[in-house]
Image: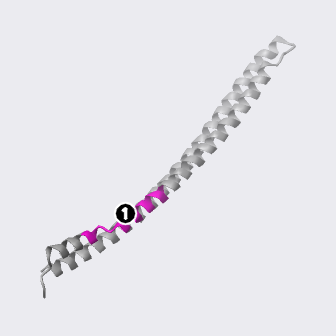
Amino acid sequence: MAKQTNRTAANDIQSLFDPKNYQDMLGTWSDYNARVTTLVVDAASKSSDVANDTAQEAFSNVRELASAKTDPAEYAKAYSTFAQKQMELFMRTAQSLGGIAQHTGQQSVDVASSAGQDMGAKVASKAEEAANTTKSAASKAS
């Protein structure tokens, strides 16, 4: 069996660095980035909707508070009602935003777990390919 020359050994080593592997990994990262971006944009959109609805209701509450009253005692009652409505609005808003954050967090965990499994499987596959290629190159060299 003929010994491998330095040139063929160098070519065999270069074949270990397959650019397709890098393209595959870039595609995987690109998919992961798209999924995470979608999560973030959806969460921001939902949060913006909640904030808009909250602002509209708060303005309505202020409008009611500022309306003219005939009896001075009605102002105290209006202020009490306003404070109660604002507290309820705050509680609903906090619950809504908390729900959005919880849902987005769970989806983020799912995406990260899925990406980790995908990348782990690809890395293991490519490592096995590299080991087989190295073993083949080593046997040719000897």
Question: Residue 59 appears in which quarter of the rendering?
Answer: top right
* Residue ID at (82%, 11%): 72
Residue 100 among those drawn in magenta = no
Q: Is residue 103 left or right of residue 79?
A: left
Quadrant of the image for the N terminus?
Answer: bottom left
Q: Where is residue 31 drawn, in percent x and y?
A: 49, 59
Q: Where is residue 57 drawn, in percent x and y?
A: 73, 32
Residue corresponding to mark 1: 22
Magenta region: which residues?
Answer: 14-32
Question: What amino acid does circle 1 point to?
Answer: Tyr
Query: Quick one: SS at disc 1?
Result: helix
Q: Main secondary structure of the magenta part?
A: helix
Quadrant of the image for the C terminus?
Answer: bottom left
* Residue ID at (67%, 41%): 49
Q: Specify whether residue 81 is in view.
A: no
Q: Specify whether residue 103 is in view.
A: yes
User: Vertical placement of 94 versus 11: above or below?
Assistant: above
Q: Where is residue 9 drawn, in percent x and y?
A: 18, 74
> How crowded is the residue under tag 1: few (<14 C-alpha within 10 Å), some, or many (20+)?
few
